[in-house]
Image: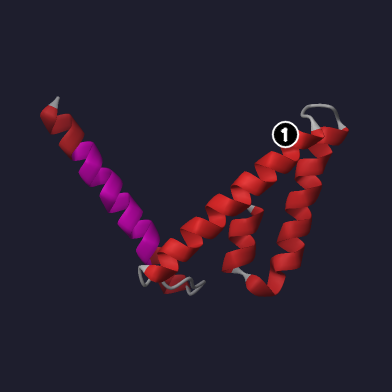
């Protein structure tokens, strides 16, 4: 999540990455995970976020924080879930 936020908001990237690193390393510090687990999770998350970011840019998506874009995405997600839900109920 920290890598994805850093890619979407480049001016705040150091802050997002610092929060992500602190969160991951705190898991090792309190003994919930091994340090290697945390480092592997950070690397895997960063690779997946970077891959998806490149694919979205290549597909022509623009990353923006404009309020009308957020509303468009929210409405799109709502109508897609209604469509999927409606088709699921019809076929069952």
User: What residue is rendered at 41% in x and 72% in y?
Assistant: 68
Asked if 39 appears above or below 50 in the picture, the reply is above
Residue 9 location (% of width, % of height)? 62, 69
Q: Quadrant of residue 12?
A: bottom right
The location of residue 60, given as percent across then percent down, is: 36, 72
Task: State the SS at label 1.
Answer: helix
Query: Seen from this angle, which residue lies furthest right?
Result: 29
Q: Residue furthest left?
A: 90
Q: Is residue 14 above or below residue 49?
A: below
Tell me the quadrant of the picture where the C terminus can be found.
Answer: top left
| Residue 91 highlighted magenta (yes or no) | no
Q: Residue 46, how many percent across, how many down?
A: 62, 53
Q: Is residue 35 left or right of residue 52?
A: right
Q: Main secondary structure of the magenta part?
A: helix
Q: Which residue sits at x=69%, y=40%? A: 40
Residue under label 1 = 37
Instruction: Read off the magenta span.
Output: 72-86
Question: Mark 1, residues whose alpha carbon is within 10 Å: few (<14), some, or many (≥20)?
Answer: some
């Amino acid at each position: 999540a920290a890598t994805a936020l850093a890619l979407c908001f480049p001016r705040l990237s150091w802050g997002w990455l610092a929060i992500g690193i602190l969160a991951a390393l705190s898991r090792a510090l309190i003994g919930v995970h091994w340090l290697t687990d945390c480092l592997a999770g950070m690397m895997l998350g960063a690779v997946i976020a970077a891959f998806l970011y490149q694919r979205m840019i290549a597909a022509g998506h623009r990353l923006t924080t404009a309020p009308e874009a957020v509303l468009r995405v929210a409405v799109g997600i709502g109508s897609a879930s209604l469509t999927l839900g409606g088709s699921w109920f019809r076929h069952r």
